[in-house]
């Protein structure tokens, strides 16, 4: 992991090349290096990190920061396999404008992960080659991993309790 000084130097380099407003903040906590960026800069930021040796996109995750705003987040975990070094890149978008450029054209491993984030959280990845639901049916309404999604569902029938009139869960 880059140490706190290394993280700040990395962020300065990213800001110098991707634009002064590209990097919003850095967080170094429990030996984890995190760079928080503007959503529209994610493609050039990840490409710069690839040039620095972070050539493996290990995962892409969706996050709901409810009730904070901007509410939806996307986290990218990068790995430098030679130095065994990790860095996390985070961004946040609002519910009103949940658009993020897709990194799938440059990082094919992000394909299904971006589709899952779209399906579960509603983040729209502009430029994705096949952005459609992956876990829920195409006609499903809503995004089940959002924190304000109603919990519940269909009651479960327990036939053993049917004679007592308590066959369904409440």
Image (spheres, grey):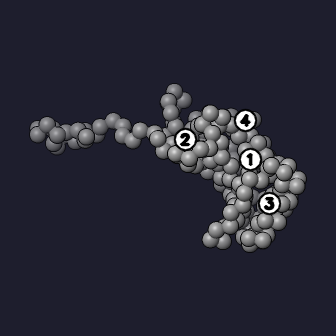
For mark 4, give the secondary structure: strand
Q: Residue at 51%, 27% (x, y): give it.
A: 139
* Closer to the eye: label 4 or 3: 3
Against 30, residue 14 (above or below) is above
Q: Residue at 62%, 33% (x, y): give it.
A: 96
Q: Quadrant of residue 78?
A: bottom right
Per the image, the residue denoted by label 3 is 11
Q: Quadrant of residue 49?
A: bottom right
Per the image, the residue denoted by label 1 is 38
Against 143, residue 53 (above or below) is below
Crowd class of label 2 (few under 14; some 14 to 19; many from 20; radius 10 Å)? many
Per the image, the residue denoted by label 2 is 120
Q: Nearer the viewer, residue 151 or 93?
A: 93
Residue 79 shows in this picture:
yes
Q: Residue furthest left?
A: 164
Q: Where residue 91 appears, x then y in whole percent?
A: 68, 49
Whole-Å distance between the Cαs marked 1 and 2? 22 Å
Residue 47 shows in this picture:
no
- In the picture, measured across the screen, residue 148 lies left or right of residue 53, that is left
Res. 126 mark: 4
Q: Nearer the viewer, residue 66 or 152?
A: 66
Q: Where residue 107 appears, x then y in whole percent?
A: 76, 48
């Amino acid at each position: 992991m880059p140490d706190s000084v290394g993280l700040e130097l990395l962020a300065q380099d990213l800001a110098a090349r991707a634009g002064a407003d590209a990097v919003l903040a850095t967080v170094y906590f429990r030996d984890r290096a995190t760079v928080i960026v503007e959503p529209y800069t994610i493609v050039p930021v990840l490409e710069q990190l690839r040039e620095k040796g972070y050539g493996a996109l290990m995962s892409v995750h969706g996050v709901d920061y409810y009730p904070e705003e901007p509410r939806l987040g996307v986290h990218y975990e990068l790995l430098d396999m030679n130095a065994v070094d990790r860095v996390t890149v985070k961004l946040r978008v609002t519910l009103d404008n949940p658009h993020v450029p897709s990194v799938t054209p440059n990082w094919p491993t992000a394909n299904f992960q971006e589709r899952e984030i779209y399906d579960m959280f509603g983040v729209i990845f502009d430029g994705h080659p096949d952005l459609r639901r992956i876990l829920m049916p195409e006609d499903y309404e809503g995004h089940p991993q959002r924190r304000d999604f109603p919990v519940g569902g269909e009651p479960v029938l327990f036939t053993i309790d049917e004679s007592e009139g308590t066959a369904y869960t409440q």
